[in-house]
Amino acid sequence: MPTAIYSREPTKTRRVLVVGASGFLGRSVVRAFSRAGYDVRGLVRDSTKGARVSEEGGTPIVGDILDAQALQRAAVGCSGIIHLAANPPVRVDTARVRIEGTRNLVQIARREGVARLVIGSGYWVYRGQPELIREDSPVDPRGESKINYDTERAGLEANGLDDLEVMVLRPGMVYGNGSWLRGVAEAIRTGEYAVVGEGANRWSFIDRWDTGTAFHAVLESGVAGEVYNAVDGHPAPLREFADFVAVELGAARPRTLPVEAAAREMGAVVALHLAADRPTSNAKLRSLGWTARIPHYRDGVPGVLREMFPHGGTTS
């Protein structure tokens, strides 16, 4: 394992570009780097979203990941880049933003002498398995996760070119206000949510703001060409999680939906993803000195639910 050099103490001022900075994950990354003493530039397509970057301590820059000139202006003087862009503009598909956008970032990084590039991906690229998932576990990317996996490949293929160091971070189920958790919580409140399969399959969670510090740790201390999982280290059965949220909301226990029925309603790829067993290890990320501030979803989810429903709906 590499020697851990990551620290929560502020570093000397350095500049980092966060692409997709106004999004759910982007804001957490901007905050993490800003609090670590970085000069943070946040690329946003829409100037109206710039306030989200400013609120977290960054400087918004209007531009598009598919616009090489805009990227070059944003990357001047940066020592690192974080790629989180995922939402495409009108008439552009996600694959272009993720994959072509990665290639654009690689070109700009090499041209501007940017030392490190971290690609944000997701742990859904892994094939489900009962054994603890590590970074070298088998993958089976499908649907959106196939786009993420191809994005990873586009970045890692450039590792070492002109001394550029590329790494990948695969967060697990990132929860926070504005994530998938809102949809799940609202469906549980109304009785519309269903656990796909028996619910014995395990999900691996991580708090939104802990994900931000994970990106900081990888940019600061990650090994070039490597992949890192970002989870809190306490995988939990889906049924347990759904029941916990229901209790917090004062709602009825969610029903069960057989995988076959879920496949007909949601499509096979989504249904299989939801039913897959993904108990995931964070040992490699912890070897960099990173630790989760919120060690278990039971510690973090109640506060997020209260933030989502400030006028009631939770039991604590």
Image (spheres, helix red, strand yellow):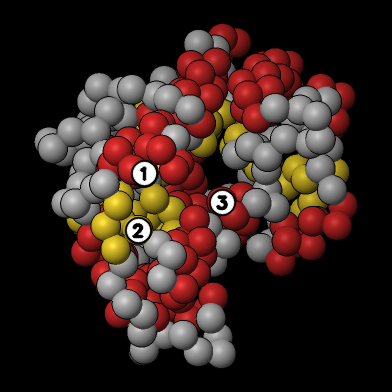
Please name the residue that numbered disc 1 is placed on: 262
Q: Position of residue 221 (x, y in %)?
A: 41, 37
Label 1, label 3: how many angstroms apart (C-alpha)?
A: 28 Å
* Marker disc for residue 194: 2
Label 1, label 2: how many angstroms apart (C-alpha)?
A: 9 Å
For residue 77, which quarter of the picture? top right
Residue type beneath disc 2: Ala
- Quadrant location, the C terminus: bottom left
Label 2, label 3: how many angstroms apart (C-alpha)?
A: 26 Å
Q: Is residue 136 above or below residue 289?
A: above
* Residue under the image location 41 percent in, 20 percent down: 225
For residue 19, which quarter of the picture? top right
Query: On the picture, is 35 further left or further right than 223?
Result: right
Kindly state the secondary structure of the residue where label 1 is placed. helix
Q: Position of residue 265 (x, y in %)?
A: 44, 43
Residue type beneath disc 3: Leu
Foreground of the two, 14 or 176: 176
Q: Position of residue 186 (x, y in %)?
A: 49, 69
Please name the residue that numbered disc 3 is placed on: 25
